[in-house]
Image (cartoon, rainbow, N blue to C red):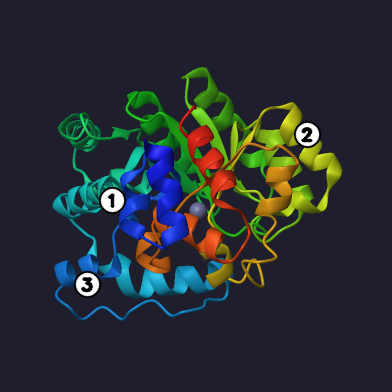
Amino acid sequence: MDSELFKQGLIENDLSKIRKASKVDVHNHCGLGMRFSTFNKWAGGQVTAPPKTMDGIKGLDEYIFGETFKYINKEEHIEFLIEEAIKEAIEDGVKIVEPSIDCSTITFFENSKDFFKLIEDIREKYKNVIDFRPEVGMPKSILNENIEKWMVPCIESGVFKSMDLYGDEALEKFERFKEVYVYGRKKGLKLKAHAGEFQGPENVRKAIEILEVDEVQHGIGAGNSNYVMDLIKERNIRLNICPSSNLILGAVKDIKSHQVRKLFYKEIDITINSDDLLIFNSGVSEEYLLLYKMGVFNENELNYIREESLKR
Ligand SMILES: [Zn+2]
């Protein structure tokens, strides 16, 4: 039923049909999980719209720190950000969502228990329509003392099902995060890290070998190395790919030449995701449609990716 509707939607260029089919969004940054129009309305209508192209993570950070994050300073604002990301995912037919919530969010709460309770309450509120699996994230620029102060209590809380690491890929090595990843594993969290977005296969290999991740956010740089692609396959690692994000941030020159097809035909487990809806203005359904329109995959291939993505 879902499959027929989904494939028809692609062939007929009918987004409403694609949206009705079950999907996942497992590479989704919570603070940016709503449409720009929703955020702008909430913030009073004076927010500058995101530019059409940006200079990598530097450009992205310049925009979000200069334009959107300055409006976020209260506990209720956090509730709004998380809940809107969930509502947006539901609208798009997403059945499993893993939005990463930055560990520094804990600082907005006088009592960390209130932070954890808020997440639990939202999960409970929407549990009949979506499997909301909270993820805790940290930037590569985080200070060691803040890993202890923010990240460790989040892992300990039992609220988060997975963890992620993001920010400037070239910034520094994965070794510094090894200990907290071992702790996350011990506490039963699924381990993810951003790698191979702008950097090549070596960056992906290091994330895999040092942090022992289960999934890589992006990981498209792996497409340039048979060795790293084999390593990904051998360890059954999933790559959570976001085509529009790659294009807008300049990680790929166009969608047609995106590595996603090569990775798929290497039989690597891949998913299609939104990354930052507020910035890239493209939900998971739109990402599928984009790949179809650009001739990267046909409707059967995309439906296979969609069905497989629901299995983990
Ligand atoms: Zn990301």
Q: Taking 306 as reference, is 128 left or right?
A: left
Q: Nearer the viewer, residue 164 or 269?
A: 269
Q: How far apart are marks 2 and 3 (CA)?
A: 43 Å
Q: Earlier in the sequence, mark 2 or mark 1?
A: 1
Residue 312 position, x and y percent, is 49, 27
Which residue, given by chain and number where applicable, does mark 1 sit on?
85
Name the residue rendered at 53%, 65% in the picture: 293
At numbered mark 1, what does the secondary structure look like: helix, strand or loop?
helix
Residue 68 position, x and y percent, is 31, 69
Q: Callout 2: 10 Å neighbours few (<14), some, many (20+)?
A: some
Q: Nearer the viewer, residue 292 or 90?
A: 292
Q: Nearer the viewer, residue 260 or 185?
A: 260
Which residue, given by chain and number where applicable, does mark 2 sit on?
231
Name the residue rendered at 21%, 44% in the picture: 109
Which residue, given by chain and number where applicable, does mark 3 sit on?
40
Q: Taking 43 as reference, is 163 left or right?
A: right
